[in-house]
Structure formats: C-alpha cells, structure tokens
Amino acid sequence: MYLSTISPVLDACALESAQLVVSRHNNAIMLTQKISHIEVEEAKRMFEHCRNVVIVTHASADGDAIGSSLGMYEYLRKKGKDVRVVVPNYFPDFLKWMKDADQIIMYDRHYAKAKMFIERADLILCLDLNEPKRMDNLADPVVMSKAKKMMIDHHLNPSKFCDLTISYPSVSSASELVFRLIDSMGGLSQLTKAGAEDIYAGMCTDTGKFSFNSNDPDIFLIIAELLKKGIDKDKIIRNIYNNYTEGRFRLLGYILSQKLKVLPEYHAAFFTLTKDELNQFQYLKGDTEGVVNMPLEIKGTKLCIFLREDTEKPRILCSLRSVDDFPANKVAADFFNGGGHLNAAGGQMPCTLDEAVEVIYKALDAYKDLLQA
Ligand code: 5GP
Ligand code: MN
C-alpha cells in the first residue's frame, strides 16, 4: 500500500509518477522514494544472506563517513550480524563520542586485524565513497576481496566495483541514504537510538548544520523520526562543534587574521597553511575541518580555496567551497586533480605550496567570467 501526503483518491501509479511515494512497508515513513525498489530488494537479499560484514569508508573520514558507517553498524548488529567498521586512517576526535567509535579499526594502524576481518567478510559495504581511490591503502584489499560489495553513496560518477551500487548524488549525505535504505526495507524499528544519533551527526555535518544542500523537506521528516528515537540533537551539535581544542580555535584566529587572502575582483578568497604553521598550533587531524566555509560569509564571495601541506605525504591537499551554481567540483577536476560535489570539492597536488598558489590564480583566471557573473 502506497502512502501519500495528498489526496487519497489518487491511484498508486499517479502517486508514483508524482514522486510522492513512500516505501511499501507498513512501518515506513512518508518520504519521496529515492532508492529504487529493485535496489531495496537487492540490498535486503544481500543483508539476509550475509553473516560477517565489514563497513568501509573514505580516507580522512568526516562526520558523514563515520555517521553513516556507525548507523549501519548499529542496524546490522541489531539484526544479529557480525559487523566491523574499518577506516583507512585516523579520524577526528570530535566524532569519538559516538557509541562504539572506539571499536573502529584504522587500517594504517591495525593492518593485520583489518585484513583478517576483510578476508573473512562475506559482505563489504562501501559508504560515502564513489571509487576505490578514496580509500587510499585500503582500496586494494577491498577490491580484491571475494565478498559481495554494496556501495551506498552520494558522490557523482560512481565507479563500478560493487555488486550493488546505490548512488544518489542528489541526496545530501550518505547518512540520509542509510536511513532511507533502512526505512525502505521496513527496518526502522531496528534502528537504535545510537544509530539515530550517528545518522543525525552525518546529515548535520554534510549540510553545515542544515545550512546548505538541505532544502529537501524529507530531511526534516527524517529528523523528526530520529528525534522519536530519543536523540538529543542539541547535544549532538555541541559534541561535534563545541568540542575543539584550544589549538584549533587559535589556528582559526590565525587563518582569519593573518592568512586569508580576499580577492574581491574574482569574488573569491583563499588561504594556505604549511606543516610548520600546523605544528605551531598543535594540529590534530580534523582541526581545519569546516574553516574553508567561513570566507563564504564575506559578502559577494562565491568561491574559497584552502591549500595545506599534508602532514603524512609530500603533497598539497586542496579544499574548495562555493555557493549557488558555481561548480567547485569542475575547478577541482580542471586544476587540482580532484572532484567532488558542486559546492564542496577537493583534490591533491604533487607540488610545493607556492606552485599550488600559482595554480589558484590560473584557476581564477580561467573561471573569471563565471565568478564575476
Ligand atoms: P574536503 O574539502 O572536505 O576534503 O572534500 C570535500 C569533498 O570533495 C569531499 O566530500 C569529496 O566529495 C570531494 N573530494 C575531496 N578530495 C577529492 C579527490 O581527491 N577526488 C575527488 N573526486 N573528490 C574529492
Ligand atoms: Mn558525505
């Protein structure tokens, strides 16, 4: 039986074409259907037939990566599965309040243990990533594993390395997709309060506390369901955002007062950080998370670029953020060996910081017309 928020006299076909359709399960809530029925049924079948599950996500995991992974972990554990979350490397401290975050295995630190679980797995879930490359060193063991693989992701251009690819770039977070999949499978009652907290955290961080990419009314219907699970959303926001070290806070001041270059003629801004500067502020992974969004608060700014020396490899990491329809992902692809979403993109460059700054100016010149429009 389809459910609708509008006239009950519309027949099921009309409803489906009008995309006002929910899922087919009695317990499901009223969301516009995004994940196709075929994919839902295939995912259900894969979950029924698995025993040992490994959940993997992208390198330098963010709130959505960890939130979607732990949300799915909670759900599958409740279903009696043996579940492990393996991440390529360290993830930020401000995500460690999540239940069982201390059970997450970091591949670069606990290589043998992670490899053992991957080899033993009969199902691998690839969350918040669209291609193996995003997993760094974890890519090879995942791709080579004989386990069935399922991708649940919202980045453009998913590569075909999974048996089931659930890819919806219009959805603002992988965590939202995890919720939608669980709901569509009729599994909402098996989502625990901790799982609801994880999903809320992922949705919240990928939309800047619901300040961008978050006009879909479904997002708020989902939040209502998560609240019904008993989550304290205000506390989750405090756990994530009011949880920085003094070093991070002072680094922010240093960037804004000393490092930020504003280029009104391009409607753009950028800043750079060397390894020495990061060390000066006792840099911990995640300390610069979100700072690249801040210059967009300057009136008229459409694009902000942040370059920093990687503390682990000899390369420059690039983050780009934009507003409206300015394509940060195209700039990242054209100039910074990267890609991403329309308004949030990144990349890496095998060069010096000074050389990378020159690339910024080249990129701004190339996109001058669009920036000035
Ligand atoms: P961040 O600035 O947070 O590192 O990355 C923002 C977004 O850009 C990520 O969510 C991801 O979609 C995308 N991104 C970052 N680095 C890369 C990259 O090297 N390649 C591609 N294709 N996308 C990236
Ligand atoms: Mn994401």
Image (tube, rainbow, N blue to C red):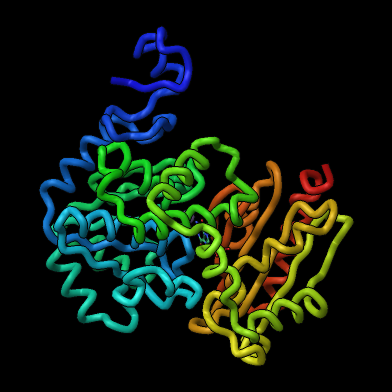
In this view, the residue farthest toward the right is: 265
Does residue 231 appear left or right of residue 268 in this picture? left
Up the image or down, 27 lies above or below 324; here it is above
**How far across and down, in percent of the image, does residue 141 sit?**
24, 68
Q: Nearer the viewer, residue 236 or 310?
A: 236
Up the image or down, 176 lies above or below 286; here it is above
Q: Quadrant of the N terminus?
A: top left
Does residue 123 appear left or right of residue 254 in this picture? left
Residue 311 lies in quadrant: bottom right
Does residue 62 appear left or right of residue 269 in this picture? left
**How far across and down, in percent of the image, does residue 136 sit?**
38, 69
Q: Is residue 205 visible?
A: no
Does residue 316 appear left or right of residue 9 in this picture? right
Q: Is residue 332 visible?
A: yes
**How far across and down, in percent of the image, does residue 245 sit?**
60, 83
Q: Nearer the viewer, residue 132 or 220?
A: 220
Q: Quadrant of the C terminus?
A: top right
Measuring 44% from the left and 30% from the top, which residue is drawn there? 32
Residue 294 lies in quadrant: bottom right
Measuring 29% from the left and 34% from the top, which residue is drawn there? 27
